[in-house]
Image (cartoon, rainbow, N blue to C red):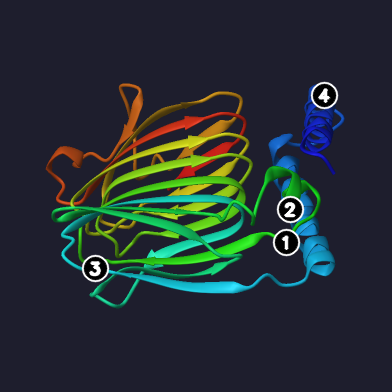
Amino acid sequence: MRARTFWGIALIVFGGLLLLERLGVLPGSAWSYVWPLALIGFGLIVLIGAVRKGVLPVTNAALPLGGAHSARVVIKHGAGQLRVDAGEASDMLLAGAFTGGVESQRNDHGEETDIELKMPSQAFAPWDWFNLREGLAWDVQLNPTIPLKLSVDTGASSSHLNLTKLNVQRLDIHTGASSVEVTMPAHAGRTTARVESGVASVDIRVPDGVAARISGNVGMGELKVDQSRFPRHNGTYETPNFDTATDRIELDVQGGVGAVSVR
């Protein structure tokens, strides 16, 4: 199936659901039907791709910490499944298992290091995905002892980012037609985060004891914020003790056609 055909079908289905909702034929919100249908379609693509293409090889890779005292890590993941978590080895900057391989680039600038991870050019292209190629699974573990600037760019993927034990000072997430679950850092001091979502479902969890200030705009989608934790105040959602909290997150959400929840 070509990308143009896929998006044509997706828009027709979504428009039909909205029309049925407006006519009163469809009970409940159209959004409650969109994401189950999207997940079913995603599962069918992965399942059929596995049958037709077989299992892709897994590459294990690791980068030593060296003399780095801080790092900027950029992860570019096109399709499949992405997991990011804290590693256990204090002498490793990054380690992981990468289905289909990975291309990495490292640039050291004194005590600061820049890392970029991306899919090999021959492993993934948009037309491969829509021809039912097996999704690529990445499991990335980052060093929990140094300050990190983390940038995650995903396409048609399912992403689980468990940043609880990581010292993430800056977080940028740009996601397309995907599902993203993020657990924010629990003891990183101040974290600045920006989430840009397209046709995506994004679930953001702020750990207990961490304050947050949430602002942003979701176009045709929906922004749900747990106001029992983050009351609305002057156009933002904010923990009452935000300015004095030791651990706090300043989050900016910019969404397109999708649902973003913060709890």
Residue for badge 3 = 65
Left or right of 233? Residue 159 is right
**Dot 1 amino acid type:** Glu
In this image, 249 relative to 22: left or right? left
How busy is the neighbourhood of tag 2: few (under 14 within 10 Å), some, or many (20 plus)?
some
Which residue lies under the disc numbered 2? 42
Callout 1 secondary element: loop
Of the two numbered discs 3 and 2 in the rendering, the one whose residue sits closer to the viewer: 3
* Disc 1 to disc 2, C-alpha distance: 11 Å
At x 79% / y 64%, what residue is drawn? Answer: 47
Residue that carries the numbered disc 4 in the rendered image: 19
Secondary element type, mark 3: loop
**Which labelled disc corresponds to residue 134?**
1
Q: Nearer the viewer, residue 239 or 190?
A: 190
What amino acid does circle 2 point to? Answer: Phe
The kind of secondary structure element at disc 2 is helix
Q: Position of residue 38 (x, y in %)?
A: 73, 46
| 20 or 122, nearer to the observer | 122
Labels 3, 4: front one: 3
